[in-house]
Image: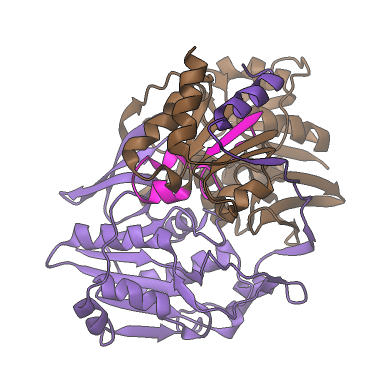
Chain colours: A brown, B purple
Amino acid sequence: MGTIWVHAETKDGQVSSITLELLAKARELGDVVAVHAGNDAEAAAAELGAHGASRVLTAGDLDGGLVGPALASAMAGVVDSEAPSAILFGTTYGGRDVAGRLSVKLDAPVITNVVDLIDDGGLVGVEPVFGGTTNVRTRFTSGKPGIFLVRPKSFTAESIDGGPAEVSEIPIPDLGNSGGAKITSQFVEESDGPKLDEAAIVVSGGRGLGEAEKYHLVEDLATKLGGAAGASRAIVDAGWVPYSYQVGQTGKVVKPDVYIAAGISGATQHMVGMKGSKTIIAINKDPEAPIFSIADLGIIGDVHKVLPALLEALEG
Amino acid sequence: MKVAVCVKQIPDPADPGELDIETKTLKRDVKLILDESDSYGVEMALQLVGEDGEVVLVSMVPNNERNGLNNALAMGADSAVLVSDDALAGTDALGTAKVLAAAIRRIEPDLVLAATESSDGYTGTVPEQIAELLELPSVTFAKEVSIADGSVSVKRQTEEGYDEVSCPLPALVSVTAGVVEPRYPSFKGIMAAKSKPVEELTISDLGIDSSQVGWSGGGQEIVSIEPAPEREAGEVIEDEGDGHERIIAFLEELKVI
């Protein structure tokens, strides 16, 4: 189905995992061109090529500007000559910005929260709604390039040992007011363990912990198991932990090998973000908690007793 | 200082309703409430403008419903612009952004605030689309916001931590949940909300043609709606002091430990 653009997110030449996932799907669908911003396109070209991209179109260094307006403008400038049939973005902080800006530039809609793409003559996006109980399939009718925002872990990244992608630059037009936001400094929040959306084990806490001070039980267990700590929306809204911890429909979608839900009742909003986990363990004192309906092992009990006992036993 | 806040009135997430298979739209027979995600933007706006600024709410909703809007007015917002039109049924994120952008243009705010995403549609693209339509700079996923000397400073969530971003006004900022503690409306606030100005507009008031919104304006169609494969429940046991042992045995079985 012609050319598929994939938004390539990189850092110091390293390609992000969601980008590699998108490349794996895109190469099933057509000729893959990576579209990129940053000063590391040459460094990333080998890995992008190995995963199926034949070319990299890079907008180059952004000089402190945010990726959204800059890359969207650069993409819009070459969309006619390059004529992609579909443009795939990961649901990331940067990907959403570029997709939103680009959709206005092209006056084309975005299909969001996509968990699968099906080639059915045109490209059809599959999106879960109502806590993942229902799947909606949507396709574009406008004849414009289809813009898709795809959730992490929807596809499996795999190298096909392709040769390095050929890098060419695409110009960033004058952004006017839209380009006014500038990054003045960057902070890395040190975390010893794996990232939440990449971890093989995720331990999440919810309102059942009772108070913010008890969240350390969740973090301690995550650390002990070499996993990442997550949270339900309820305790993020309550300010116990930052938004970056949130697992759910709003927030991060995780698909670890093991997901441990501690004191989480299982609102639909949360379940859609974790029900793709390979194995789910739930601890909750309410036997009626919806989380038990999808748990492989459910413990009806008090997290304040079960978690400390678990930590102590793992210590020994 | 004038701040426009985008607010969405949604069915209660605890009772989210269902899709009407015939019309492929959400059945909206329930009372709408203020999306909790938007209460952070309202609170942020109230804190940023202080005593002498102005907070204007902007909302697009069927049938001029204003139950959720009243809640935000009761929190302290000064006025609201409410856009309702039969032609808006089925409008997607881009169409919604066009309507909200047109309404915001009339307000001429120094700052536009929005949530990062709504709790019911959660496309997460509307704020950035509004910014592009208004040719404004934007900072999404703000976890801290301050204003000084005609520019807004934002701590913006990133995959690794956060960026400090500075942006000249006027600008749009989308705020993450939990950034501020939304106040509860006081009794006085609730009473005062009833007499606050709410401007009701249709799309023709905004100069928007019906071909740009609704089902026809979306440029996309739903092919099918089907139940997702169900996940089955496993073993559920009562903790009798041995719950942790069961978990450990299970983790060992999975070769995690």
Q: Residue at x 34, y 57 (%)?
A: B40
Give the residue at the far bottom of this rendering: B195
Q: Position of residue A199 (x, y in %)?
A: 57, 26
Q: Residue at x 37, y 25 (%)?
A: A188
Task: Report how many numbered discs are placed on residues in the image.
Answer: 0
Say which of B36 and A52 sits in front.
B36
Q: Position of residue B140 (x, y in %)?
A: 41, 47
Q: Residue at x 32, y 49 (%)?
A: B179
Q: Is residue A205 left or right of residue A30?
A: left
Q: Is residue B20 left or right of residue B152?
A: right
Say which of A58 and B232 sits in front.
B232
The answer to whether residue B96 of the structure is visible from this angle is yes
Give the residue at the far front of this rendering: B240
Say which of B118 and A22 sits in front.
B118
Magenta residues span A233-261
Q: Quadrant of the C terminus of chain B?
A: top right
Does residue A244 belong to the magenta stretch?
yes
Does residue A295 belong to the magenta stretch?
no
Give the residue at the far top of this rendering: A316
Give the residue at the far left of this rendering: B51
Measured along the vertical axis of the image, is residue B238 above or below residue B7?
Answer: above
The answer to whether residue A165 of the structure is visible from this angle is no
Q: Quadrant of the N terminus of chain B?
A: bottom left
Q: Position of residue B48 (x, y in %)?
A: 20, 57
In the picture, residue A308 is in which quadrant? Answer: top left
